[in-house]
Image (tube, rainbow, N blue to C red):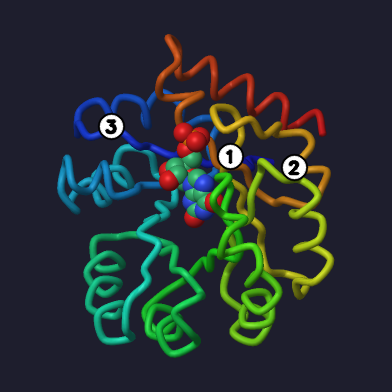
Amino acid sequence: MKRLILALDVYERERALEIAECTADYLWAVKVNWPLIIGSGLGIVTELKQVTGLPVIADLKLADIPNTNGLIARRVFGAGADYVIAHGFTGRDSVKAVMELGETIIVVEMSHPGAREFIQPATDKLIELTNELEPFGVIAPATRPERVSYIRSRLKDGIKILTPGVGAQGGKAGEVLKAGADYIIVGRSIYESENPRESARRLHEEILGV
Ligand code: XMP
């Protein structure tokens, strides 16, 4: 089963398409974030789907009022994105505005050190919100497998856990999958490596061994 998501955080369209195409065999999905959309335009979402045939996750971490979240999400889903990532701390109306338009993933905790300041203290409430709204999934930190276990234990069955933070941020794929993650998200360890295909293949093998 494929459980690897490529975080394609490069600016250049051609480089992005090249890396996505050569790693696609080992991926469940490709994640695009602001760097690629700013560098290459929203059309890259459509192109990535055509080139790889894989789902595309738009990691925009939407955090605005419902109307603005909706205006953004409408265009992004319209370009072919299969999933959009939104923050939950803006409240249920803002999240619902995205969910009405397509599959949504809610951030319940983040992987960087600063996440301890404001997001982690709110995680329980964000999990409650998620259990009420039942989106496709949540984002949880691969850098803290114990937090992934905790989130899994409180999250309704069927809601997926996607975890960034493997590799460059220090998280280990095996540990976080054993802790309850469904998918791992990896960026720099793949796209900055000398051989992105080989790096993706190794991660895929590691996932199969769990
Ligand atoms: P690296 O290069 O660190 O890239 O493998 C990770 C990717 O995932 C994003 N990211 C996060 N997104 N919550 C999120 O919603 C997080 O805690 C988080 N940590 C990393 C990051 O922007 C990059 O695209």
Give SS at disc 2: helix
Q: Residues within 10 Å of mark 1 (few under 14, many from 20)?
A: many
Is 65 displayed left or right of 138 in the figure?
left
Front residue of this view, candidates 1 and 161 = 161
Q: Which x, y percent locates residue 204? A: 64, 28
Name the residue that disc number 3 marks.
17
Quadrant location of the C terminus in the rendered image = top right
Front residue of this view, candidates 52 and 83 = 83
Q: Is residue 50 visible?
A: yes
Front residue of this view, candidates 117 and 188 = 117
Alpha carbons under labels 1 and 3: distance apart: 23 Å
Give SS at disc 1: loop
Q: What amino acid is at disc 3?
A: Leu
Q: Residue at x 29, y 31 (%)?
A: 16
Q: What amino acid is at disc 1?
A: Gly
- Asked if disc 1 and disc 2 are in contact, CB closer than 8 Å, the reply is yes
Farthest front residue in view:
117
Give SS at disc 3: helix
Q: Residues within 10 Å of mark 3 (few under 14, many from 20)?
A: some
Q: What amino acid is at disc 2?
A: Val
Q: Is mark 1 within 8 Å of ligand 1?
A: yes
The part of the image, by quadrant, that contains residue 119 is bottom right
Name the mark on residue 146. Answer: none
Alpha carbons under labels 2 and 3: distance apart: 28 Å
Q: Residue at x 43, y 90 (%)?
A: 93
First in sequence: mark 1 or mark 2? 1
The part of the image, by quadrant, that contains residue 30 is top left
Is 67 displayed left or right of 171 in the figure?
left
Farthest top residue in view:
194
Name the residue that disc number 2 marks.
176
Name the mark on residue 165. Answer: 1
Q: Residue at x 35, y 47 (%)?
A: 32
